[in-house]
Image (spheres, rainbow, N blue to C red):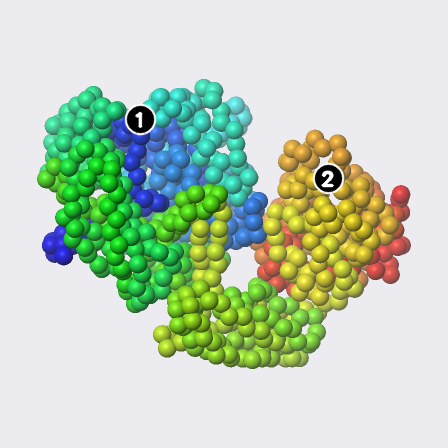
Amino acid sequence: MLPKRLLVLLSGLLLSLSVFAQVPYGPIKPAPAGEILSNLKKLNVLGTVLYVAAHPDDENTLFLAYMAKGRLVRTGYMALTRGDGGQNLIGAEQGENIGVIRTQELLAARRVDGPDQFFSRAYDFGFSKSTNEAVRTWGQDKVLADVVWIIRKYQPDVIITRFPPDARAGHGHHSASGYLAEEAFKISNDPTKFPEQLAYVKPWQAKRILWNVFIPGAFMSNKKPDEAGNLIGIETGLYNPLLGKSYGEIASESRSQHKSQGFGVAPNRNARIDYLLLKGGDPVEKDPFDGVDVSWKRVKNSDAVQAQVTQLISSFKPDQPSASVPTLVQLYSALGKLDTTNNYVNVKRQEVQTLIQQCLGLWFETNPTDFAATPGETIKVSTNVVNREEFPVKLVGVHYSTGKDTTLNLPLKPNEVVQYPTSLTIPKTHTISQPYWLEKPIDKGLFQVDNQPLIGLPENPPAVAASYTVEISGQRFVYTRPVVYKSTDPVDGEIYRPFIIQPDVTANLTERVFTFSDNTPKTADLVLKAGRANVSGTLTLAAPTGWKVEPASVPFSLTYKGDEQRVTFTLAPTAQAKDGKLQATMTTSNGTFTTGLRQIAYKHIPTQTLFPPAEAKLVKLDIKVTAKNIGYIVGAGDEVPAALQQMGCKVTILGPSELNGNLSGYDAIVAGVRAYNTNPWLARYQPKLLDFVKNGGNLIVQYVTPGSSFLRNDPALPQLGPYPFSIGAERVTEEDAKMTFINPQHPLLNYPNKITDADFNGWIQERGIYFAKEWDKAYEPIFSANDQNEAPKLGSLLYATYGKGHFMYTGLVFFRELPAGVPGAYRLFANMISAASSPAASVSGSQRN
Ligand SMILES: [Zn+2]
């Protein structure tokens, strides 16, 4: 056992780690000599900058890389949102699930360019055109409180915004991020503002706030009255010989982590100036840190420390970093005698501790034999430690956050891996590893998080952490890292994955929404999965009154961890049924379980596991569908095919080989969102698809983004439809915007379902995006709609006849509304796919060949 005093210290460290610092991913690793020297130089820099914007990918990665790795100041990026409203180029996740991906992409970017990452509780509810709308939807006070919280916690000298607080920012979230940062700058030092935070942090006044102006030329001609100051320019496109890269190269590598947004970029190796404009605080002449002393003079009685650091830098031996260790250990002790109420003393002490580990080439990791365990379960883990240098290091012991301690007192021989197997019992009271911001339902524009220390953290503190105590030159150091699962893939090699705590049993319904157009029963499936061995109990399916669920409860028994049991049941509405939720509950001798299991696995981020509620929506649709056979060309991943199946259609996914075949059997062919952007081969089949239309078929193209280079350059695809039309960036973001029917008699609005205003109730996030901009007169626009204070837009749904058939282009966001179970979206989409059988279709529109 470790001495009690040390234990207290350890748990204190763990707490402070989880509250105030970010926990790196993977093992504790050595660093190359250039990076070590850079870190030594950083010991002499006592300055902090906080960059604020709205989304993952807003941040200027060049500026961040330059600040973190060039100027060597503590650098943080606060993204107000997790990017939940973004479109997903690599999969079908939407909403909070794409937010989870983009959170991890930001962390991957920070592992490249260096800064710390923070968020607020704001939910990215989709494109917003004004600061007011954004701030109103989020709830101004809560998000402002979060920016103040991060300022007080991180104590920046300088705050930099990416966006101005007005319409020049382009997107309401962007202008809101500028506005909230400027407001927070003004009040963070006022103890009467958000006093509840003062239990954890102190008021803080940053010296100034600056806007990182993006297009200086355009800005100079569009200045606001209060922007009298001059732009200052700083050279950020420099080369760092210690890292062998320019900040432009680091920036592009970082930006390319935003893969779900398709933001891979080539590096800019040119010189480059970044421009800043004072928005508040002390005047500035040429540098954001003007008048900020970033030396050890900020800490009382630190002359000796400063001298020691300078000596460490000048005597560093790149081929023998361990020669610096004795002085680093002395420095660590000396720092402990300084005023620890000064945040920099603690920050630098932590940096020195990391440097000692890097100079020795120390490697630590603890790996369990599985990536998940349940509360109360005992797991096997292996702790691995290596000392890479001829320098005496003793592994004193390891403390695991499950409460277990091991005393080893083992001298670490150079280059000999010490493997220590042990078992850990997860406490019965351990929480499940659901991301903390998703534990409660989203309150319109805000994640509900009550635990103040969690606010701002990019992800959960580790489920289980290991703290390694080592003795070096007579001094003890504790290094803490998450326990992390690793496996070996024959193609990708070693893969790390977060270790998580999961429930005893989860239930996944095979559909998110069950729709019924009459009272005919539907069979539905649910898959139970065991989180541990030998779990048995009763599954109950609860539905609102008026719905029949059979069987309503089923006993289950799962023998092995990971075992699955499929339960088939039938669902049917009665005349009294109202829309509602179908909820699964599993009752075992261990308690009650009500969640499903969702894994988000992509190669560029650590695999994420979520535990959403085990429920599905029940929707009674007043709907007729005459189309039966639908061909679907999958775009950037969407759940429309499942919705078509719910409507009773047979759906065939069309790839190149299917498109080579006979298409005449399809009542309609539907192209998924961005199908023409993501499938370059699709252009080759355009003549065939248009022939399909000409011969009486029905082709529906969901939105395409106009920016794709092959769309612009591909001679095989001069246009998407039978007649010319162009696609712009126009959108209607207010999900309740009035939809005016241009020609209420149009067959699309009447057959087989009579579309009324009520069909546009309950839409989520937005009406539509990437509307058609200009079109040949052969097309009929079906709707007119606009956001408040904007001109009407007609391009949300275009319809034309061509030969004997029908063509439609739509920017309406069916890909969001159908999976969300919005009845009106089903009815309108049913009319679109049924157009070929409409009795009125042949007399509508201009007939051209
Ligand atoms: Zn943005």
* Tag 1 and tag 2, C-beta contact below 8 Å: no
Amino acid at the residue labelled 1: Gly
Tell me if 621 is positioned left or right of 134 in this view.
right
Circle 1: element type: helix
Circle 2: element type: helix
Name the disc covering residue 535, or none. none
Residue 821 figure quarter:
bottom right
Question: Badge 1 is on which residue?
Answer: 34
Residue 677: x and y in percent read 65, 41
Pick the residue in front: 487 or 218.
487
The residue at the far top in this view is 271
Residue 239: x and y in percent read 39, 21
Question: Badge 2 is on which residue?
Answer: 683
Looking at the image, is 346 positioned above or below residue 616?
above
Mark 1 → mark 2, Cα distance in angstroms: 49 Å
Amino acid at the residue labelled 2: Ala
Q: Residue at x 53, y 37 (%)?
A: 263
**Residue 717 showing in the rendered view:** yes
Q: Quadrant of the N terminus?
A: bottom left
Q: Residue at x 40, y 35 (%)?
A: 112
Q: Quadrant of the C terminus?
A: top right
Looking at the image, is 633 positioned above or below residue 231?
below
The answer to which of marks 1 and 2 sits earlier in the sequence is 1
Tell me if 767 is positioned left or right of 392 in this view.
right
Residue 416: x and y in percent read 24, 40
**Residue 735 showing in the rendered view:** no
